[in-house]
Image: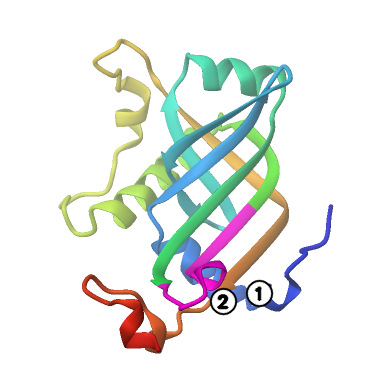
Amino acid sequence: MNGMRQSTMKVTDKQKINDFLHKTNIGHLGLVDDHVPYVIPLNFVWFHDCLYFHGANEGRKTRIIQKNNHACFTISEERGVMSNPIPAKVDTAYMSVIIFGKATLLENMDEGRDVMQAMLNKYVPGYYEKPLAKSHLEKYVSTLGSKTAIYKITPSAITAKENKLNETVKFTPGRTIKMDL
């Protein structure tokens, strides 16, 4: 594993990383299809210190994982742009986490139900009156005719990075260079 070049931005606070993974909604799954990168945006849930995502049990993503299950999952959040009279010093505030590991198909229906319930709790909290039934996972078929596959990435490494927002130079519509001179 390569070290982080901008080590001053490295985040090591496990609670901060954990909170970020629980609240951020979209991540990007990175796979290798033979020798070609393949990256797709996905909903996910951070649950019991593992990352889970779901999708159709057939298609390109599934075929790639069956051949090569090495994966990285990148989650990022933009927090604003910081202006500066020097064009090369305009910067973006953000936090990002990259999780490295292997994507494995969940076979255990109880774990699958718990993961999908955690996902529902994250994306639509309080919407459903009853917990998800295990039978839903067993019977559900999408409009395209495929069953749902749930994948788990058990981290072999996690890196996190943050460029904090400097509120005094945060760009807002209408701000001009004259305001910063």
The residue sitting at 64% across, 51% down in the picture is 99
Element type at marker 1? helix
Estimate the x, y position of residue 50 in percent, counting from the top left.
59, 52
Viewer-proximal residue, 15 or 162?
A: 162
Start and end of the magenta stretch? 82-98
Disc 2 marks which residue?
Answer: 15
Q: Is residue 48 above or below residue 30?
A: below
Estimate the x, y position of residue 106 in percent, counting from the top left.
56, 32
Q: Quadrant of residue 69?
A: top right
Element type at marker 2? helix
- Looking at the rendered structure, the kind of residue marked 1 is Met
Query: Which numbered disc, 2 or 1, marks the residue that appears first in the sequence?
Result: 1
96 relative to 37 in the view: left or right: left
Check residue 89 for magenta coloring. Answer: yes
131 relative to 69 in the view: left or right: left
181 relative to 69 in the view: left or right: left
Estimate the x, y position of residue 62 in percent, counting from the top left.
55, 20
Viewer-proximal residue, 154 or 6?
A: 6
Estimate the x, y position of residue 73 in percent, counting from the top left.
58, 45
Q: Is residue 176 above or below residue 126?
A: below
Check residue 37 for magenta coloring. Answer: no
Disc 1 marks which residue?
Answer: 9
Q: Quadrant of the C terminus?
A: bottom left
Mark 2–mark 1 distance (CA, rounded to whole Å): 16 Å
Most extreme residue toward the top, as rendered? 145
Viewer-proximal residue, 132 or 118?
A: 118
Viewer-proximal residue, 154 or 93?
A: 93
Check disc 1: other Cα within 10 Å, few if <14, some if 14-19, many if 20+. Answer: some
- Looking at the rendered structure, the kind of residue marked 2 is Gln
The residue sitting at 26% across, 48% down in the picture is 131
Q: Quadrant of residue 177?
A: bottom left
